[in-house]
Amino acid sequence: MDHLNFYKLKEQPFSNAVDTRFYYNSSQHAEAIIRTKYAVDTMKGLAVVIGDIGTGKTTLARRLLDELDESKYEAALLVVLHSSVTADWLMKKIAIQIGVEDLHGTKIELLGQIYERLVEIQERGLKAVVIIDEVQMFQSQEIMEEFRGLLNMEGHRGKLITFVFFGLPEMENVLSLDEPLKQRVAVKYRLKGFEGNITEEYIQHRLKVAGCDKNIFSSDTIRSVHLYSKGIPRLINTICDNAILEGFLQKKEIIDNEIIESVAITLGLKLEEEKRPKAGREF
């Protein structure tokens, strides 16, 4: 018997691999979707979602892409994998993402191809959207200037393309490389760690998706998970994943605080000093 069978799970509930089946629509993630879709629907040009490591930006970007109906949008997702990309690479990549065929010629000619394709998309009654994840990887003012140039493209119905940027807080510095572009940010949203009650809902949601029909974490245990993870989804997953294995090895049907503390020590996670309310009289 393995740990999945022991806890009657059909699959891994706390993998950090991006899987939209496990997406939990917390209030802040729902609000981020609403705000970014508003920017897209009204063709605002540029929307930005910022969050610390592990707060669910990549999952949210994929969720946004899934929610953009192909009958209404020409949408694509671009993930930046390293910081050595050039402006030329970016322009060609965007051209490919929006469906430009037979790329050729100079940069000016490429811009012309992009413009013609965007006009074609607009005339078909669609809205062009490019979602870009890990935008903090862009380290070049030239790249930011290229985005500004693309946002200058307009047709008779207004802007021809909307970008939705996802990235770490360092993205603020990247946007500052081109102040006129930074001033064009029409919608901005910041993701944070979950509150305690949301952490509990998140854990129960993922267990349910994985086929678990009982509580294998007590409320006190989930509180410990929340404190060690600070409500950051990726850390919640890592702690819970390790706790399930440890619970199986110890043959504990209910995962307790002792297991969570052991896992936290192994992962090098520490608790912040809790702020306790000062004692005082009530009047």
Image: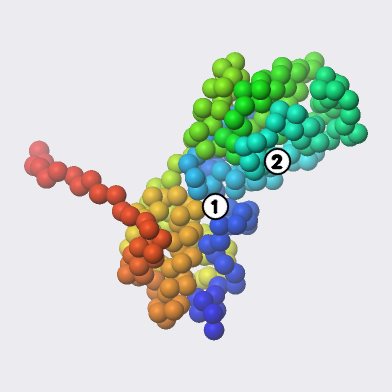
Disc 1 marks which residue?
Answer: 24
Residue 77's tag is: 2
Q: Which quadrant would residue 48 be assigned to in this image?
A: top right
Q: Position of residue 209 (x, y in %)?
A: 57, 63
| Mark 2 element type | strand
Q: Is residue 121 left or right of residue 22?
A: right
Task: Say if mark 2 contacts mark 1, CB within 8 Å.
Answer: no
Circle 1 Cα neighbour tier, 10 Å, few/some/many (<14 / 14–19 / ≥20)? some
Q: Is residue 34 visible?
A: no
Give the mark count: 2
Q: Is residue 68 above or below residue 109?
A: below
What is the residue that sits farthest to the front in this orientation? 84
Q: Tell me the kind of residue under disc 1.
A: Tyr
Quadrant the C terminus occupies: top left
Q: Position of residue 118 (x, y in %)?
A: 81, 26
Q: Tell me the kind of residue under disc 2.
A: Leu
Circle 2 Cα neighbour tier, 10 Å, few/some/many (<14 / 14–19 / ≥20)? some
Q: Position of residue 275 (x, y in %)?
A: 23, 46
Residue 171's tag is: none
Q: Residue at x 50, y 33 (%)?
A: 170
Q: Which quadrant would residue 40 be assigned to in this image?
A: top right
